Image (spheres, rainbow, N blue to C red):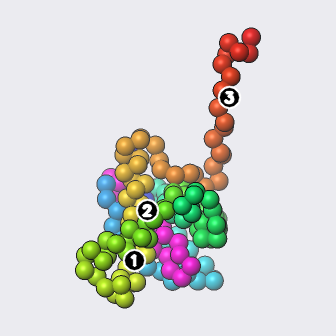
Amino acid sequence: MRSGVRLGVDVGSVRVGLAACDPDGLIATPVATLTRAADDSDIRQVVQEAAEREAIEVVVGLPLSLDGHEHAAAQAARRWAGEFAKQSPAVPVRLVDERMTTVDAHRAMREAGVSSKRSRAHIDQQAAVLILQVALDSERVSGNPAGVLLGGRKPRRKNNRSVEGLR
């Protein structure tokens, strides 16, 4: 497990949830809920947070459909992540499948006895916590960072032919 603070981001159409982990990468905690802005001020706030915390990476949730395809929300998250990467090129960005995290966040808030009206301000933070915690747990188990590095190369397809078949 790599040491260092990571930020988790849940990009919504209206708000952006932000979470961070401790330097040992053990537990994700909520940081803030930001308002999405046409002037990218939400992105600048996350850039500033990453700099202040000396984050080693930012994990952005990619809301894939249940069948694994990308639709409008996933494309918006990808654009947000790309703009973050432009504004903070020294901080790697990883995209992590976040299917069902908002549903899980709503459920957790409801089980904690928080009304849906009161939870709106915190649901995006909770979703960011879940995204980041899944990434941390995945890395701890596998030894590899979770998700896909933004701007990274796609893995090469393995050739199924054996060396013997080439002779």
- Whether residue 58 is visible, yes or no, is no
Residue at 57 percent across and 63 percent down: it is 65
Quadrant location of the C terminus in the rendered image: top right
Label 1 neighbourhood size at 10 Å, few (<14), some (14-19), many (20+)? Answer: many
Whole-percent x, y for residue 135 in the image: 43, 54
User: Circle 1 is placed at which residue position?
Assistant: 123
Q: Quadrant of the N terminus?
A: top left
**Image point 67% across, 16% down: which residue?**
163
Q: Nearer the viewer, residue 143 or 12?
A: 12
Dot 1 or dot 3: first in sequence order is 1
Residue kind at label 1, given as amino acid type: Ile
Q: Is residue 31 above or below residue 130?
A: below
Location of residue 46 in the rendering, given as x and y in whole percent from the top left corner: 50, 72
Range of residues picked out in magenta: 9-25
The type of residue carrying mark 3 is Asn
Location of mark 3 (residue):
159
Instruction: Return the residue at label 2.
Output: 131
Q: Could you tell me which residue is drawn at 28 percent across and 82 percent down?
A: 114
| Distance (Cα) linking label 3 and label 2 | 33 Å
Give the crowd class for mark 2: few <14, some 14-19, many >=20 residues within 10 Å: many
As drawn, 26 above or below 155: below
Give the CA distance from mark 1 to mark 2. Answer: 12 Å
Q: Residue furthest front?
A: 67
